[in-house]
Each structure stands twice: as structure tokens, then as C-alpha cells.
Amino acid sequence: MAVGGSFDTFPKLLARNAVQFSSRPAFRHKDLGIWQTWTWAQVAEIVRAYAAGLHRLGLQPGDTIAIVGSNRPKLYWTLMAAQVLRAIPVPVYADAVADELAYVLAHADVKFVAAQDQEQVDKVFSISDRVPHLHKVVYDEPRGLDDYGHDRLIAIGDVIEDGRAALAASAALGRQIDGFTRQGEGSDISIILYTSGTTGASKGVMLSARGCIDAATDTVRFDSLTDKDVALAYLPLAWVGDHYLNYAQGIVAGFCMACPESGETIEQDRREIGPTFYFAPPRGFEAMLTRVMIRMEDAAAIKRRMFNYFLGIARRYGESILTGKPVPLFGRLLYALGHLMVYEPLKNVLGLSRVRVAYTAGEAIGPDLFAFYRSIGLNLKQLYGQTEAFLYVTCQPDGEIYSDTVGPAAPNVDIRIAETGEVQFRSPGMFVGYFKDQAKSAEAMTSDGYVKTGDAGFFDERTGHLKIIDRAKDVGRLADGTMFAPKYLENKLKFFPNIKEAVVYGDSRDFVCAFLNIDPVAVANWAERNNLAYGSYQELAGHPLVYDMVAKDVAEVNRSLAEGRVLAGAQIRRFLILHKELDADDGELTRTQKVRRGFIAERYAPLVTALYDGSHEADISTEVTFEDGRKGVIAARVKIRDLQTIGATEPLGKAA
């Protein structure tokens, strides 16, 4: 499938799809337990009417319209309708607290907001005095909004009907709307995506229409995506991954975007819809496997033995069979039996039976986890990307899959490693600049036009593929000169199902220490099987037996570090289990679930001090934000555990 010529904006591609894929499904949405379907021809008609309605409300070329909510067809259609009018959509994370929302809406000079439901409408109105340009709010779900004043609040359905009626009554309006589509240019700003703000205030990344389409065209061709494919559109609308993997690739290839009923029904909806193209971050694949393993713990002994036996067969032969390498006949027969009895039923339970291509990215995935999914026949691959690249910088080609690399450069992407070790790239989808921030835009670029990723990496000599070590600014040294790569260590810790989150410290210090969050699902299941009573997450996290269990996981990380030369000296000598889960609402994680290491160090400074002064417990009081926005305080006495490092002769908890 080729895209080129005059198809340099998404509205032009939508018009093409209405003809070329007219009766093919474009969107599906499960509402009240029933899947509804819209074809490309229907979507094109709806979006044209919606654009006319928004135009009549005052949305003009160059205006910005925020989109706040979960994955819903009408919110995707808002993106499309805004682009028809040459306005600029600005998706915002649905779980953004009021202050975050206010910052983005004010910074982007938002004139319109499309909100999913009452919760989002309330949030917008609560900060409307901080958004001086706000003119209208349109909404999708009407429940709870009947008694609201409607001078600035209008249902999206009503906007569409108004536009449809106006188009029927005025041919001139129709010519005007169609004229906007024809006048659209590839250089138009197609969308502004705000970064997650790992290291400071979010920046508005401006992406051009042509750049988005060219990049998506390359990867659609790379993975042979067509109008026959289906993607489950559950990723946050404000994340570049959703806009690229679902929206851009979906419009370019003409495939169907299926929206789940809710965040709680994704697993069931995935089984029902049977996606053929699928993305999940490593923690998503970890969560799926954790649920499977928990269920197997409760299964009959004979089922557990069969499950474990055929997983052994999969580990031995699965990767070779998936990549077409030679496998003995006996191995193929055993694998075929395992496919019938274990692998295919397992993929069916997970909703992955029809997946042809699956990707993961965002954090490093544990090699065993990666190998597990590939061994049961899932074509799981890795990519490395950034918002500023419009996602893809690298991706793994079929037949060249390695768990410890992120692949070679994506199609038409040029990558180089600077003398400092920083990864730099040029790509078709690279950003135009940061909205209202020329200084930061210039800072992100080299003088010869490469984007600075801020990540440290190198090309593996054996495969030629890129390896990412850590954020360049985060790679440090212990006091003795040993390399300290915190993200690398954190990812190794998070591979264990009992550990949900990890934050490590050690730069310029004598040794490495770690904050850990337990996984409440996995550890609660373990507690239940071992008749361990507890009343809260805090009580479970502080239990001595939980510390014993987690200590074994940390010790295993130390053993793996000791096997290498570069990071053998960065073994973890002390750790603690935090009394609360790290939370984006408390500023400890970004909206894409990345740890804000510096902020956490400041917030929990007494605990960092205790880790390094030899204390075995420390008191801490922490302000938390509840779902309804109220504040509270959680106080605890947190225990600290020492670990024997490989090669040491005694515990080193009081070494500093």
C-alpha cells in the first residue's frame, strides 16, 4: 500500500479511505456490552458534519482544541474534525489532575475542549478561570450533565447534527468545509503532543502533517499492515504511541481502531475483538503473565505439571520455530502438541490469538519475559522512540529479534552516537519544534539537524542493533568510579513479579541503595496462599516475610550484575519497601509511568538519608492526593534491609 502525491494531510487520507475502503470498518466501540461499528464512508460523513458544526461554533484555522478523556470514537473524530478545519488538536491525559490540565490548556491557548464525560467536564470548569481563551466545551457522554448550564457546554452529538443540518441547507458551507481539506498542506501543524514531564514542565511537541504521514507510511509498509488489520485503541490519547500506532497508522493503512468499553474491561474486550496489531508496555505484558501464573498456582496439580512441561518445550524450540530456523522433527511434534494443549489456549485467554505483530517499548523488557511470549508464538518485537521523533527511532525486523537491543534504525531514520555517548537521530516524523519555546527547540537540536535524545547508547558489535543504557544525564559513577546506570538497575528489579516499581540511588556515593514498591496483586495472592493476614498495602509492604521474599529478588539482581565487569560494583547493598505506591497524582511518576527520580529523592529525603547513614528504620510522613482531589497524610516507620553483595565478606549496611 502506497501513500504519496497529494495525500499529505489526514483529512485528505480520510477522503481517500471513504472511497478506497468505504465499507471496511474504521472504528468499533463497545458500549453497554455491545460492539458498534462505523465504516470509513460513515466516519468521513460524520467528521465532515462535525467539522461544519465546530466551524459554526467558532473554531478557526490555527485555533487549538484540547481533547480530554479515554479512547472513544467521538474523541478520535474530534481530532479528525479539527484537522479538517486546519485547527490543532491537543490531547491531554485523562488522569491529569486539575493543575496539570490547567497548565496544558493555558500554555496551548486552548479555545475549545472536547471532554469525555462529567468527570472531565467538571475538571475543565474547575480551572476555566485559568484558561483565558476557553470558549466552548463539547462532551461525549451525557450522564450527569442534564442539569448543567449549556451556554458553554454542548453535546458532541448535537454539534454533529447541527453541522449535518447546516450542510444540507447550505451548499456554500459544504464547499467551504471541503475547501479547508483541499487547502491543507503537509507543513501544517497536525497535532501538539505534550511530553510526560519526566525532568520538568511538559513541552508541547509540534508535529507536521506530512511528517506524521511519511513516518506512519514507512512503518505500515515495514510491518505489512493493511485494511484487514485491527488494533485495540486503549493507549492514552495524549501519548505519542496512541497517535502513531493507532491513529496515524490506522488512517494510512485503513485498518480498524477498536475502542474498549472502559479501562477495566480491556482484557475481556481484547479477547472479543482479537487484534492483529498490538502494543503494550513491558508492565502490560508483565501484568498479563502475572495473572496467568496466579491462576496456575490455583490450578490442579496435573494442569500445573502439563503447563510447566510444555513451557519448557517452548523455551527450547519456540523461538527457532517462530523465526523459521531448523528444529528436529521430534521437537516440532512436541511443540505442535504444546501449541494445541497450552500455547494457543493461553494466547486465546490473553486475547492474543490473532496478533501478527506485537510491540513493546517505553522501558527495557526482561529477557525471560520477552522470551516467554516469543516462545509461545507471539511475534513480539521492541522499538525505541520519542515524541520528538513521532515515535519510531528504531524497530526490530522479523528474524532479527534480540531481547537486549531495540533494533536497527527504523525505515528512513538516520542514527548516530555522539562523542558523549548520546543517541542522536534524524527521521521523517521529527518534530517541528516546541510550542512557544524556541530556546528549548534549539537546545534539542544539533547544528547539523539531528535531534538530541538525551539517552546514552551504543551499537552492538555482534548485531549492529542499538542498545540503550540509560538517560545520558542519569548515567553516573559511584565514589570508586564504578559506572552507575539507575534505569538499567531499576528495569532488572522490575522484572520480578513481586516488584512493581523501583528507584535506585548511588551517584557519587559509596554504594547503591533502592526504594521498592511491591506489586499488590502478586504479593496479595502470595499472602493469601501463605495464610498471611494484613489490613492494608502499608501493612503488607512492611511485613518481615514480604521483605524476605523481595530480598531474594534483589539478591538475584546482584548475582546477575556480578557476572559482568562493567556494573559488578553497582550491586544493591541496602533497600527498603515504601509504605505507599508511587503515584502520578502525587508527582512521583509521570503520566506515562516513568519515575521522577529527583523529585522522589527530595520528597523522601529522610529515607535516603537513613539508607546511607546505617539506620535500620526511619519515620516518614507523606502527603497524598486522593482520586477526588482531596489531600491526606500517610505516616509510617519504614524498615531498611541490608544485603550481602557478591564477593563481600560481611553485610555493608553501615559502610558509609
Image (cartoon, rainbow, N blue to C red):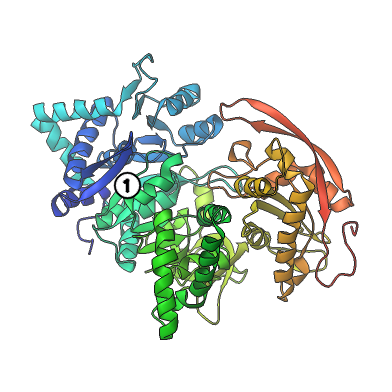
Give the labeled residue for mark 1: 258
Residue at point 88% right, 62% down?
A: 651
Front position in the image: 564 or 351: 351
Q: Position of residue 619 (x, y in %)?
A: 83, 38
Disc 1 is placed on an element classified as strand
> In the figure, is residue 76 to the left or right of 581?
left
Figure quadrant of the N terminus: bottom left
Up-down relation of residue 317 to residue 376 (above or below): below
Residue 261 lies, in percent from the top left, at: 37, 39
Q: Is the residue 208 above or below the residue 366 in the image?
A: above
**Residue 2 occupies quadrant:** bottom left
The three-letter code of the residue at mark 1 reads Ala
Identify which residue, 353 or 394, lies in the foreground: 353
Image location (x, y in percent) of residue 119: 45, 27
Q: Is residue 389 visible?
A: yes
User: Is any atom of residue 62 visible in this view?
Assistant: no
Residue 166, how many percent across, how many down?
Answer: 15, 27
Residue at image position (55%, 31%) is 99
Question: From the image, which quarter does the C terminus lie in?
Answer: bottom right
Above-or-below relation of 626 to 575: above
